[in-house]
Image (spheres, rainbow, N blue to C red):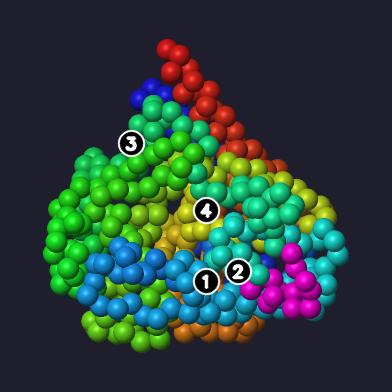
Amino acid sequence: MKTFLVLMMALMMCFGSYSFTETAADNTVVAVEADGAAAAGDPYTLEQVVILSRHNLRAPLSSNGSVPSELTPHDWIQWSAGSSELTLKGGIEETSMGQYFRKWLDQEGLIPENSIPEEGEVRFNARDKQRCRATARYFAAGLFPLADIEVEYPGDSKGTEDFMKPVLHFYSDAYAEDATAQVAALGGDAGFDGLAEQTRDAIKLIMDIVDMQDSEAYQSGRYGDLLTDGSGYEMEADKEPNLTGAIQTAYQVGDALLLQYYEAPDAAEAAFGHALAKDDWAAIGQFMSTCLEMKHGAPLVAANITNPLLRELEAELKNEQRKFSFFCAHDCTVLGTLSALGAELDALPDSIETKAPIGVKLMFERLRDREGQVWYRVSMVYRSTDQIRSAEMLTLDNPPLKYVLSFEGVETNGDGLIAEADLFSLFDRSVNVLEELEEAYALEDAA
């Protein structure tokens, strides 16, 4: 525990006019007129945009033999894609997001509409998962409809590294013990028992919606009792941390249920005929966000897993030639990065997934003021839950939501912007945490 306390201290130290719906200084979402940064009187000029994106709507693992398929007597909807692949609706919504950015970036004077970028001006990178690569391609098609944009991915001819792979890059038994203690602390003094108590109502709701008690698999006892069985957390070197027990089973079913809610036009159909209020769906979304935080949100875990990605993002932000960059991975990638950087985010407004909703973009904007000083705005750009369900076309008059982030211990100016030196210092401190982990636990192992 001595190492744990030392590292916690280190982790704590680590930590205009737009055509978006943007957050005000108090982080409430407000409407902002689409005047454009190029308009007279705007004090900042946009020079670069770097995006870390979650993939868009995918089909769940609800095929025959999967946990969701076994734990309901009902048939899930007919998906337009194979298990875990991007759906047709997901492709349409991501293209629409790209088209929106096409209009916005032209309005800001950064990338002219219908232009073909020069070599080195833009970069697209995705994990080697169909849903990630497809999301990047759909976004690129919306943003650059006349250009043949290359999407890098691990295993391509360029030898691209999988720097967004959500695995532990350092491991020791002492580290795993301290990290697991951080996860358990989400449940208060009661630890994992407290987490079970916090999530029990949501798990019961998921069970009732899918009529789990009527499924042969649940009646057989093979999955235990999701309301009383314990839950936990497991870690292994070079692997992704995962939940165990009842909460993991409920998470798998909840994932399929939430995706079905996004995909199906009829909410009653999505709930297998049950009449649910929006608050019920919000409870499921909050449960999924809690599970995501348990898996990847603990500071000791996030700093470990995201280290290669943080290095890549910082290098990208320092690339003076680059105008636009797009990295695509998963909800855990976005959440882990937010946690590793010490982002102050309680819940995203108008989204039932409160931390990393479908298709969300963690966006870094490099802005230069009239005196030549460089500033950064860091924000979450995302569709509201209603915009996802209705598949609305995003336009300058119907923009996505934008939530401006702040970071623990990092000052901002009156416009909510971070000075360039302060942002890079934040990245450097966050990147160095992995080395500090290795050194601290090596000392403990030697003691």
Tell me if label 1 and label 2 are in contact, CB under 8 Å. Answer: yes
The magenta stretch spans which residues? 138-150
The residue to which callout 3 is attached is 181
Residue 391 in view here: yes
Give the residue type at disc 1. Leu
Residue 112 in view here: no
The residue to which callout 1 is attached is 86
User: Which badge, 2 or 3, comes first in the chain's sequence?
Assistant: 2
The residue to which callout 4 is attached is 333
Left or right: 147 as drawn, with respect to 288: right
User: Which badge, 2 or 4, comes first in the chain's sequence?
Assistant: 2
If the image is split into quadrants, where does the N terminus sit? top left
Q: CA distance from mark 1 to mark 3?
A: 35 Å
In front: label 4 or label 1: 1
Q: CA distance from mark 1 to mark 2?
A: 7 Å
User: Which badge, 4 or 1, comes first in the chain's sequence?
Assistant: 1
Give the residue type at disc 4. Thr
The residue to which callout 2 is attached is 134
User: Which badge, 1 or 2, comes first in the chain's sequence?
Assistant: 1
Residue at image coords 33%, 36% = 181
Q: Which residue is more in the foreground, 69 or 232?
A: 69
Look at the numbered disc 2 and give the secondary structure of its residue: helix
Left or right: 415 as drawn, with respect to 438: right
Look at the numbered disc 1 and give the secondary structure of its residue: loop
Determine crowd level at label 3: few under 14, some 14-19, many 20+ residues with C-alpha closer than 10 A: some
Left or right: 121 as drawn, with respect to 384: right
User: Which badge, 1 or 3, comes first in the chain's sequence?
Assistant: 1
Left or right: 109 as drawn, with respect to 245: right
Give the residue type at disc 3. Ala
Question: x, y percentage for residue 399?
Answer: 59, 78
Q: CA distance from mark 2 to mark 4?
A: 17 Å
